[in-house]
Image (cartoon, grey):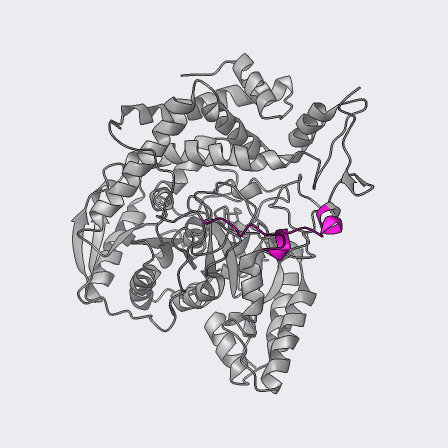
């Protein structure tokens, strides 16, 4: 029998529906692969029973001839930022260690209703703050990839680093991610998989641990564009419980996939040609243009003049929102409580938050508190929100002359764990190509393009107009078909 | 603009995060490096630009004004609400004494 862990979402769903294998066989194979891969540290907790129960339910439905759902029989990894009923949810923090929600996030509920099962909760940067997966309280995730000829542990990217590591290591066919400033696309690029952040508001944020509410958006991470389309369809949709949820129908993205880009114009933003970008990244970008031209698209030059300011604006807006969102962790209602002897309420808050938050989280809460404080609010926060408006306007102007934008996902390939962890600013710069689309709320996807000369994956990014996930997926598919990327990490774990 | 050690201590107090002297010493230059870098936003001419408050045009909806409009967040779930509390007593969250 074929190794079921080599299959993606579509192959598993269709194979289960067609009776080639049972959902239980799939769940058992992936449960075993997960158990065998603890060296990656991709999971904070594993939930093999959840995967088996969901699989048995799908097999029972098939026996009765019932519909199996869009994700019927597919076991997935769940980023530990999604609240899951009865299963510990920590956001990779100490302050939420042991927190067991009594409710299910809307996105995870939709996935279970579509027939998916859960292999476990995936590690991430603490509260999704980080670009290398080194800020987790539960230790770093190691990428399954290694640079040619070395054994140095590499970063799987962040914040969705457990998700990217699990999918690229073939211990999960797909996983959920969340993207605030690139946290789906950058890890996808680092590990040679695909991932899409839909338009802000497509996926409900209800039950997702909040980082920066005006930016956070969930999306799928999987090995192919088709698998992303299938999973996004299951995750997206209007949710009355989230006031920012879009009141729109979910398009049939899978059925609408079409790699023929005849008549489409793809914009190349000239400001993304930045100093310090690796030559291999620039080469992959050139190759990406050639692939899209081959698919029938016309390549046009576009300008996004405020690109340079997107990242610093992001590092005001996101911490500002985080400082407010994370005020809820105070040792009263859930999570950790540190109550020094004889201390009062204020001391309890301060001690609990000192012990419960990691360094990067504290750093961002302090920046957020500072930029929102009296006297600095207009100079920092209001100014950043105005620049955010200019960044969004740049995209609007560019989309007057193109249908989608092609850019690199990251300025470099993955780097060894520890390389940038002493320099927060150097770490932030890794998201320079991802953040502008996040600020503008646009759908954006990373697809694997090629390996660099050191044998590490590089991703290409497509940014689309608001609500045009289909256009993004289609351009992604055109690249995927021409790139023929089928490299997988060599198993060392 | 740069922050002094005293200012960072004040911010950490506002943010309700206790910080040791050693942590403050580490944090001050890190925050200053980040703040120096965001200073470049001051170069941008934002005359006539409205700050962006909603990223996608979306009308804010109000929930129906009725009990149990959304079961998960409605009343009658006291035990669920208290289930993860570090100290829950007599159906309430327990906190240290706040008044003498």
- Image height check: is A370 above or below A28? above
- Image coordinates of residue A112 in percent, x first then y, are 58, 66
In the image, taking residue B47 as reference, residue A168 lies left or right, namely: right
- Image height check: is A232 above or below A325? below
**Residue under the point 39% across and 70% down:** A254
- Image height check: is A349 above or below A406? above
Q: Is the magenta stretch mostly helix, strand or loop?
A: loop
Q: Can residue A148 be seen in this view?
A: no
- Image coordinates of residue A95 in percent, x first then y, are 66, 39
Residue most extreme to the front: B65
Q: In which quarter of the image is residue A110?
A: bottom right
In the image, taking residue B95 as reference, residue A445 lies left or right, namely: left
Q: Can residue B84 be seen in this view?
A: yes
- Which quadrant of the rendered structure holds the C terminus of chain A? bottom right
- Image coordinates of residue A63 in percent, x first then y, are 61, 86
Residue bounds of the magenta highlight: B61-81
In the image, taking residue A406 as reference, residue A151 lies left or right, namely: right
Residue most extreme to the right: B90
Total numbered circles: 0
* Residue A215 in magenta stretch: no
- Which quadrant of the rendered structure holds the N terminus of chain A? bottom right
- Nearer to me, A278 or A67: A67
- Image coordinates of residue A14 in percent, x first then y, are 48, 79
């Amino acid at each position: 029998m074929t190794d079921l862990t080599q299959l993606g979402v579509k192959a598993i769903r269709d194979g289960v529906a067609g009776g080639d294998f049972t959902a239980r066989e799939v769940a058992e194979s992936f449960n075993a692969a997960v158990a065998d891969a603890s060296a990656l540290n991709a999971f904070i907790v594993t939930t093999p029973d959840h995967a088996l129960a969901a699989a048995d339910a799908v097999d029972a439905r098939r026996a009765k001839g019932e519909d199996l759902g869009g994700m019927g029989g597919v076991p997935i990894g769940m980023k530990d930022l999604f609240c899951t009923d009865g299963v510990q949810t920590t956001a990779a923090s100490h302050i939420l260690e042991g927190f067991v929600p009594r409710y299910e996030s809307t996105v995870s509920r939709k996935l279970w209703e579509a027939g998916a099962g859960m292999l476990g909760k995936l590690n991430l940067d603490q509260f999704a703050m980080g670009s290398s997966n080194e800020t987790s309280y539960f230790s770093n995730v190691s990428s399954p990839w290694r640079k040619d000829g070395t054994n140095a542990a590499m970063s799987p990217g962040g914040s969705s680093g457990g998700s990217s590591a699990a999918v690229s290591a073939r211990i999960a066919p797909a996983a959920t991610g969340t993207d605030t400033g690139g946290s789906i696309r950058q890890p996808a690029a680092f590990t040679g998989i695909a991932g899409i952040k839909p338009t802000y508001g497509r996926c409900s944020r209800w039950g997702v641990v909040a980082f920066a509410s005006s930016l956070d958006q969930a999306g799928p991470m999987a090995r192919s564009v088709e698998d992303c389309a299938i999973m996004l369809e299951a995750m997206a949709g209007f949710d009355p419980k989230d006031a920012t949820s879009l009141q729109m129908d979910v398009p049939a993205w899978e059925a609408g996939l079409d790699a023929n880009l005849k008549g489409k114009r793809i914009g190349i933003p000239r400001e993304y040609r930045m100093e310090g970008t690796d030559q291999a990244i620039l080469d992959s970008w050139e190759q990406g243009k050639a692939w899209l031209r081959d698919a029938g698209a016309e390549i046009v030059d576009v300008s996004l003049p405020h690109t340079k300011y997107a990242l610093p604006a992001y590092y005001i807006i996101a911490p500002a929102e985080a400082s407010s969102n994370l005020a809820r962790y105070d040792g009263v209602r859930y999570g950790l409580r540190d109550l020094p002897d004889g201390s009062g309420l204020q001391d309890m808050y301060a001690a609990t938050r000192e012990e419960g938050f990691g360094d990067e989280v504290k750093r961002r809460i302090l920046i957020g508190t500072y930029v929102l404080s009296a006297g600095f609010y207009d100079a920092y926060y209001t100014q950043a929100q105005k620049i955010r408006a200019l960044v969004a306007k740049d995209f609007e102007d560019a989309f007057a002359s193109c249908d989608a934008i092609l850019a690199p996902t990251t300025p470099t390939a993955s780097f060894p764990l520890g390389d940038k962890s002493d320099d927060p600013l150097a770490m932030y710069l890794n998201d320079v190509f991802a953040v502008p689309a996040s600020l503008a709320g646009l759908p954006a996807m990373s697809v694997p393009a090629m390996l660099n000369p050191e044998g590490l994956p590089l991703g290409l990014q497509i940014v689309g107009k608001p609500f045009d996930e289909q256009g993004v997926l289609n351009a992604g598919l055109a690249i995927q078909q021409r790139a023929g990327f089928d490299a997988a990490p060599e198993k060392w774990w | 603009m740069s922050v002094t050690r005293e200012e960072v201590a004040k911010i950490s107090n506002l943010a309700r995060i206790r910080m040791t002297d050693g942590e403050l010493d580490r944090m001050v230059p890190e925050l200053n490096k980040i703040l120096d870098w965001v200073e470049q936003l001051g170069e941008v001419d934002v005359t006539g630009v409205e700050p962006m408050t909603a990223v996608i045009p979306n009308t804010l909806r109000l929930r129906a004004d009725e009990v149990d409009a959304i079961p998960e967040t409605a009343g009658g779930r006291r035990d669920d609400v208290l289930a993860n509390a570090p100290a829950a007593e007599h159906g309430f969250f327990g906190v240290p004494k706040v008044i003498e």
